[in-house]
Amino acid sequence: MLDTIASLLGLVSNNIGIDLGTANTVVYAHGKGIVLYEPSIVAVDVRSGKVLAVGKEAKEMLGKTPENIQTIRPLRDGVITDFESTKVMLSYFINRAIGGSIFKPKPRVVIGVPSGVTQVERRAVIDAAKSAGAREVYLIAEPMAAAIGADLPIEEPIGSMVVDIGGGTTEIAVISLAGIVISNSIRVAGDEMTESIIQHVKKKYHLLIGEQTAERVKIELGSAIYEGEERFMDIKGRDITGLPKVVRVSNRDVTEALEDVIASIINAIKSTLERTPPELASDIADRGITLAGGGSLLRNLDTRIEQETSIKTQYCEDPITAVARGVGKVLDNIDLIRKVSML
């Protein structure tokens, strides 16, 4: 009998946490951990309105579709720009995470969103999640979720500084006593790094390259500091005559292309530090700055921030999934959810 009850409890415990990112969506399922890490992309047949693919399958279609198929990023700069596509995407991810059993009730969903979202943008996320099958929806600011995922002492009277660099936004926050004391959200992050590389290659080499090519260049050659030893990579694109062409780019090129984006992020960190109360600033000087988010993995970014701020800078464990792990950790702690929720 007890085994049967435990089994039934296992069936209904299907709450999930979602890091709804501009570039990627990460899903945490109760009792399972991270179960999905997929690009935030939807492919649609514009003639019929039928959804053809979501996530990885849709990303593989980027830049390769005929006129009747459109690949859509439903979020831009961390907020919903296409409600219907977001609803379809969330529904797909929620069903993938909890399965389609008729015995499972609708889940409680906790979603990490940028700290700078407006009330209208918050409502759009909640409505999309409920339309996708959620029973209850709670929103947590991404830097708070990242701090929880990084096991920082958020409920203690200690200042912790988190810099979460995602695809669409960079979220900077000083956290103490389960609240965000000072925050800064700028719409400059990983996507802008990629776009800067596209524009630099176009200007210097008169070569048009796609987003996926630029992303590979960023990963292979990108750095926040030029390391002194030049490395090269051959990339393919289309030149001004419209013909395919191959050019060789160097890590010096890419570092130069990324400089304005890196400078914007560092200026935002400095601005946040300048507004931080002295006692909390003292804690940050002792404890350092914690980096999270996929965009933070740019080579030497931690070193560059440390050089510019004179504050020790370190990565949390697995920065890419920090927000998802954070929302996952609060799933069954309704008191903590209410403390840190944006609503």
Image (spheres, grey):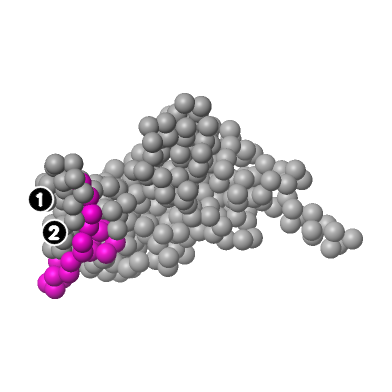
Vertical placement of residue 202 versus 290, above or below = above
Q: Which residues are magenta?
A: 217-238
Q: Give coordinates of residue 76: x percent, y percent.
A: 36, 39
| Three-letter residue code for mark 1 | Lys
**Callout 1: SS:** helix
Q: Give coordinates of residue 265: x percent, y percent.
A: 23, 52
Q: Residue at x 79, y 60 (%)?
A: 6
Question: Residue tagged by mark 1?
Answer: 204
Q: Residue at x 27, y 64 (%)?
A: 220
Question: Residue tagged by mark 2?
Answer: 253
Query: Which circle marks residue 126 in the picture?
Result: none
Q: Residue at x 18, y 41 (%)?
A: 242
- Residue 233 shown in magenta: yes
Q: Quadrant of residue 41?
A: top left
> Which circle's residue, 1 or 2, is located before the other in the chain?
1
Q: Are marks 1 and 2 in contact (CB under 8 Å)?
A: yes
